[in-house]
Image (cartoon, rainbow, N blue to C red):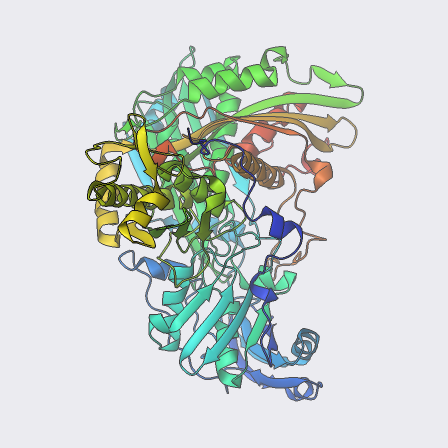
Amino acid sequence: MSEKYVGRPVDRLDGAIKTVGEARYAGDHRYPDLAHAALVHATIPRGRITAVEDAAARTVPGVIDVLTHENAPAMKPPPKVTLLNLSTLAIGTSVNHLATDEVHWNGQPIAVVVAESQEAARHAASLVRVTYEEKPAVVDFAAEEPNAVPQKSNALQSARADKGDAEKALADAEVSVDLRFTTPQHSHNALEPHTTTAVWDGDRLTVHEGTQSMAWTRRHLAQRFGVPERNIRMLSPFVGGGFGGKGQVWAGTLLAVLAARATGRPVRLALTRAGVYHAVGGRTPSTQRVALGADRDGRLTALIHTSVARTGRVGGHLEQITAASRHLYDSPNIHLRQSLVQLDLIANTSMRAPGESIGTFALESAVDELAWELGMDPIELRMRNEPERDPIEGRRFTHRMLREVYAVGAERFGWSERDPRPGSMRDGKWLVGMGVATAYHPSLQMPASVTVRLDADGGVVVRCALHEIGVGAATAQAQIAADELGVPLESVRVEIGDSDLPEGPMAGGSAQTASAASAVLEACRKLRRSALDLARRSAGSPLRGATDPRARDGGLYQDGRGETYAEILARAGRDHLEARAGVGMLRFLARTVREQRRWMKAASGAQFCEVRVDQDTGEVRVSRWVGVFDIGRVINEKTVASQLRGGIVMGIGLALTEETLVDRRTGRVVNASLADYHVPVHADVPRIDVHCLDDPDPTMPLGLVGVGEVGITGVGAAVANAVRHATGRRVQDLPITLDKLLPH
C-alpha cells in the first residue's frame, strides 16, 4: 500500500536549500552591468515640490543618474480600483510616481538615484535637497476620529449590520458593559525588506520580486509601462515574509522598473528598513466601541460593535474590524458599523488577519469584562452564547467546533487551576494571570490553475505560479499530489514562483493552499482517468475491464491486479501524460456568491494565555501559551504548527510592544527602525503549545479551511484578559506597556 502523506509532519522541500543559503531571493540575482537604486523621500506631509537640487548627488563617484519628476520617463497613471478588475487591488497607492510635483505624505518617494553600487546610490540620495510649497495637512488620527464617515459595504465585505434594536436592548439589559478600545498603527517588518531586480530587453521585462501576487503585479506593470502582459516575466520563487505587505505594488517596484528603462541597465532597488516604513503601507489604527448587554444567566441581549479606521487620501485597504462580531455570538439584537477617516498619510494595507486581529482584541476583551461583571467563568459565558447558525443572516455553518476547541484547550492549559479572583495568583513578586479568547477567521478560496505531468519514469511534476512566503506551499501541494496519484513523495516535483507557469492564487486571505489544492486534485483525477483509458485500450493490461481502480504503489490497482504508471505509458508508447485544471474568474465569482448565500465557513480556535506582571514595575511577560484550533483538515502537521505559532508570536507583538509612532505635526514616522519599533524577540515568547482538531470541512478541498491568519486573532485579547486577571486592571489601549499598569 502507498504511504499517505497528507496530515504527516513532512519536512519542507525547500528546507535544505534555505538552511545552506542556496535559496535565491529577489536581491540575489546577478546580471552584467547591474546598477543599484535608492529612493529620496519627501519630508513634508502635503504640498508641491518647487525645486530639486541634485548637483551634489551627481558628483558622487559611480552615480549614473538622478531621476525626478522633471526628467523621468512617464509611466501611465494607475487604473481606477474596481472589484470587477481584481488586479487593481494590487495598487499600493494612486500616486503616479515621478510624474507629478505633488506630495501626498511624509515619506513619499520623490526621486531615485541610480549608481554602480548600493552604497553610492544611498549616499547620493542623502545629498539630494528638495524644497517645497507646503499645504495644510491632516495627519492626526485621534484628532480626526470625530470626522469619520460611514464605510460603504462592497462585495468583499459588509461594513454594517442591524438585527433588532441593540441600543434599546443595551439600555434595558440586567448586566452590561460599554467600552472604548484603541489600537495603534502597525508597520510591516518582514525579514526581507522589499526588493526588486528589473531587467529590460527591448520591450520585454524580467522582474525578480518578493511578492505575494505575481499575477496581479504582472498585470499592473503591463498597464503602467504600456507593454503586453505576455512580455513580462515575474520571478518570485522565495519571499522572505509577506504578511500582506507584499500583496500590493508599491513605489519601490515601480521605480526600479522605471529606472531600468531610463538607464538601459538592469537595476536593483532594495528598500532600507526605514524605507519600508515610509514607502509601504501598514495596519490602520482604530478606535472601537464594544457594548454588550446580558441577562443574569449570561445570555446576550445586545451586541454593539463600531469602529473607526483610516485610509490615505491616495488609497488604502478597508479592514473588516467588526467581522468577527457578525458570527461569534448569538444575540437577538446586534448593531455593527465601520467608519473611515482619510488622512495625508501613506495608504494603509493588509496586515495579517486585517480587521479580525484588532477587532477580536476589542470584542473578546469586552466579553471577558462582561464575565467579570456577571461573576461567571469566561469560557462558560462564551459557550452559553454559542450560536447554532450565523447570527445575522441565519446561514448554516459548514464547520464550527468552538465547544470542542475550548474543552481541549482548557484541559491542556489547566484552566481548572485558575483562581477566579483578580490578583489572587502569585509567584514571588510576579502577579500571575490567565486569560482566554476566541480565534476566528473566515475561509476563502481564489481562482487557481495548475498542470500536473506524469512522466514515463513515474515522476510527477506539478506546475503552478504559487508563492512561497515561508509557509511550505510547495510541500503541501506535493503531499496532496503524491496521495492523489499514489506515488512516493520524493517522486513529486513542484514548480512555483514563475509567472510563466499556470496562474496561481495570491498568497493572502489564508486561501492559497485550499485554492491550489482544488486545482491539483482535479488535475490528478484527470491524469488517473487518462492513465486508466490507456490501460483499457491495451490488450495486455491487467486493468482491462477495471472500473474504479485505486491509485497506490506508483500505479492503478483493483481487486489485487493492476500496474504502474510507467508500465501503462510504456505499453502505450507515451513518454508522459499531462492534465490541466483550474477555475476562471467568472466561474469563481459565481461560485463564491452562491456559496456565501448558503453558508458560513471559517477557521476558529481558543487562545489560552498566562502572564506574569511585576507588581513593582508593571512589566508584563507572557509565560505560557496554549492554542487549540479547528482549521479543518491538517495537510502538514509541522508547517501548520509553525504557521499558528508565528501568528501567535505576531499577536504577542500586537498586544505588548508594536506601535508605529506618527508625528502629529508632520506626519513623519518617528520610530522607523527595529531599534525603536519593537517586535517580539526570543525572550518575549514562551513555549507555545499548538493543537489542531484535524476534522475536515466537507465543503472545502480535502476538508482544509485555512491557517495563515487565524493564529493571530484573539491573541491581543487573551493577553489583555490575562493581565486583567493578574492585576484587576482592564487595559483598553494597545500596546499594553508598563505605564498603563503602574499606579497613576
Tell me: 221 left or right of 715. left
The structure residue drawn at horizontal position 70% and vertical position 42%, both measured from the top left corner, is 681
Q: Is residue 547 left or right of residue 243?
A: left
Residue 148 lies, in percent from the top left, at 41, 50
Image quadrant in which you'd find residue 502: bottom left
Using residue 58 as the reference point, say whether residue 501 is left or right of it. Answer: left
Residue located 39% across and 54% down the image: 464
Percent position of residue 557, x then y: 31, 32
* Residue 700 can be seen, yes or no: no
Eyeballing the image, is 620 above or below 157?
above
Residue projecting furthest to the front: 540
Total marks shown come to 0
For this view, does 675 lie left or right of residue 178? right
- Nearer to the camera, 559 or 22: 559
| Along the viewing direction, whichever of 663 and 378 lies nearer the viewer | 378
**Quadrant housing the N terminus:** top left
- Taking the image as drawn, is residue 718 in sight? yes
Q: Indicate the quadrant containing the C terminus: top left, top right, bottom left or bottom right.
A: top right
| Depicted 645 relative to depicted 88: above or below | above
Question: Residue 680 is drawn in which quadrant?
Answer: top right
> How far across and down, in percent of the image, does residue 323 sit?
39, 37
Q: Position of residue 559 (x, y in %)?
A: 28, 25
Q: Vertically, is 402 above or below 108? A: above
